[in-house]
């Protein structure tokens, strides 16, 4: 047998082994609670259509990063993007799936939904423990005509490593020099005051239970739990509502094609309609895949989500990725995600 024919047969055999319909294994992921509501919706719809199940553990971005590095899941999920150097060091690829907003939520008697408005600096002072009652002059001066109770403020924050926390503290660091110096922007910080809840779910539950509480959650949790929220002043000086439109307005100022590894932070973006604590959520996968069938399953799931999941995302106040960005993402799959023998997994899908 000639050498070219032999290599052709080997290549054909590799293709058959990798992509013959075995039939499709379930896929696993873990990480951010920020996108859990939409991943759950997508997973349910995809399973009905394709018969493939997504097992996703909503454990926080820190846990998702740890699990993908340990190779215990097919993909990790984080709202805090990894830098290009971090991705290269760990043989990882990163891509965004949806965008949304982090929203300060409150439980204050006698206050209507969205009635309280705050600047970023005042919000930072609340979470620093400098402002301790809802009737404090710093809050009252921004809300003339609103009857504010003298109720004690209870700060509720995340107890786990969280991309939602990263977005929230990144924003506070941009609007408050005191916050930047004393606390900083990380997925887990040394909180000056307050009580911790695990996941967006935990924070939402504590805020609902504690009179006078203030916390921060992803917008889908605010909507699902029918929570009261704060209107925030944005970079343009406008007080805005946390809506899909205001998240999209902030996202419009993002240049994904110029971001190595899709590294983009969307907080405090310009624009009169922009929500100031907007962020994307990201998927992490290994570039070199020991289990190509599972890797292909992950890519096909998100391919389906980009093509068919926009309406489900919008219903939960997430902002879908624009079509031109989806093309960049799928091109990155083709270029970077390969089998151990070097075959580009996405380009060889059946």
Image (cartoon, grey):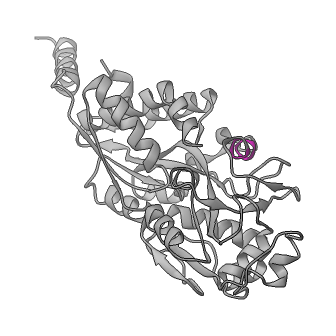
Q: Please determine whether, in this image, residue 230 is positioned above or below residue 9.
A: below
- Residue 269, position in %: x, y? 77, 53
Give me the residue at 73% from left, 73% from top. Answer: 123
- Judging depth in this view, the residue of 69 and 300 nearest the camera is 300
In this view of the protein, can residue 344 be seen by the observer?
A: no
Residue at image point 54% right, 62% down: 164
Magenta residues: mostly which secondary structure? helix
Q: Is residue 3 above or below residue 75?
A: above
- Residue at image location 52% in from the left, 34% down from the top: 329
Where, by quadrant of the figure, is residue 25 drawn?
Answer: top left
Image quarter in which the N terminus is found:
top left
Left or right? Give the position of 338 relative to 114.
left
Q: Is residue 284 left or right of residue 277?
A: left
Where residue 305 sits, quadrant-wise, is top left
The residue lying toward the viewer, choosing from 299 and 221, is: 221
**In this picture, which residue range is highlighted in magenta?**
246-251
Whole-percent x, y for residue 250 in the image: 73, 47
Image position of 89 with respect to 151: above or below: above
Task: Depth check: give the residue in front, 56 or 62.
Answer: 56
Please give left or right for residue 217 compared with residue 173 in the image.
Answer: left
Asked if residue 171 lies left or right of residue 321, the reply is right
In the rendering, at what x and y percent does residue 209 appear?
49, 72
In percent of width and height, residue 89 lies at 43, 59
Residue 47 lies within the magenta run: no
């Amino acid at each position: 047998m000639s050498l070219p024919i032999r290599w052709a047969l080997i290549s054909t055999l590799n293709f058959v082994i990798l992509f013959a319909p075995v039939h499709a294994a379930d896929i696993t992921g873990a990480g951010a609670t920020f996108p859990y509501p939409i991943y759950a919706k997508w997973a349910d719809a995809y399973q009905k259509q394709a018969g493939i199940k997504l097992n996703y553990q909503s454990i926080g971005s820190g846990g998702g990063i740890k699990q993908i590095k340990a190779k215990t899941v097919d993909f990790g999920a984080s709202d805090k993007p990894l830098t290009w150097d971090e991705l290269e060091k760990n043989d990882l690829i990163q891509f965004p799936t949806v965008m949304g907003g982090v929203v300060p939520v409150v439980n204050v008697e006698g206050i209507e939904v969205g009635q309280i408005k705050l600047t970023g600096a005042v919000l930072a002072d609340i979470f620093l423990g400098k402002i301790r009652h809802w009737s404090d002059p710093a809050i009252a001066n921004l809300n003339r005509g609103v009857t504010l109770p003298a109720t004690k403020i209870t700060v509720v924050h995340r107890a786990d490593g969280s991309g939602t926390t990263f977005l929230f503290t990144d924003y506070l660091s941009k609007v408050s020099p005191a916050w930047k110096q004393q606390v900083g922007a990380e997925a887990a910080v040394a909180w000056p005051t307050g009580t911790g809840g695990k996941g967006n779910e935990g924070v939402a539950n504590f805020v609902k239970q504690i009179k006078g509480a203030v916390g921060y959650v992803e917008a889908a949790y605010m909507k699902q739990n029918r929570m009261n929220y704060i209107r925030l002043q944005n970079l343009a000086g406008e007080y805005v509502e946390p809506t899909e439109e205001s998240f999209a307005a902030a996202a419009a100022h993002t240049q994904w094609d110029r971001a190595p590894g899709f590294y983009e932070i969307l907080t405090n973006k310009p624009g009169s309609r922009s929500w100031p604590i907007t962020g994307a959520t990201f998927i992490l996968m290994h570039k070199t895949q020991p289990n190509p069938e599972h890797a292909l399953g992950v890519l096909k799931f998100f391919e389906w989500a980009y093509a068919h999941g926009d309406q489900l995302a919008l219903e939960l106040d997430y902002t879908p990725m624009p079509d031109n960005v989806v093309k960049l993402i799928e091109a990155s799959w083709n270029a970077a995600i390969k089998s151990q023998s070097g075959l580009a997994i996405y380009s060889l899908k059946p």
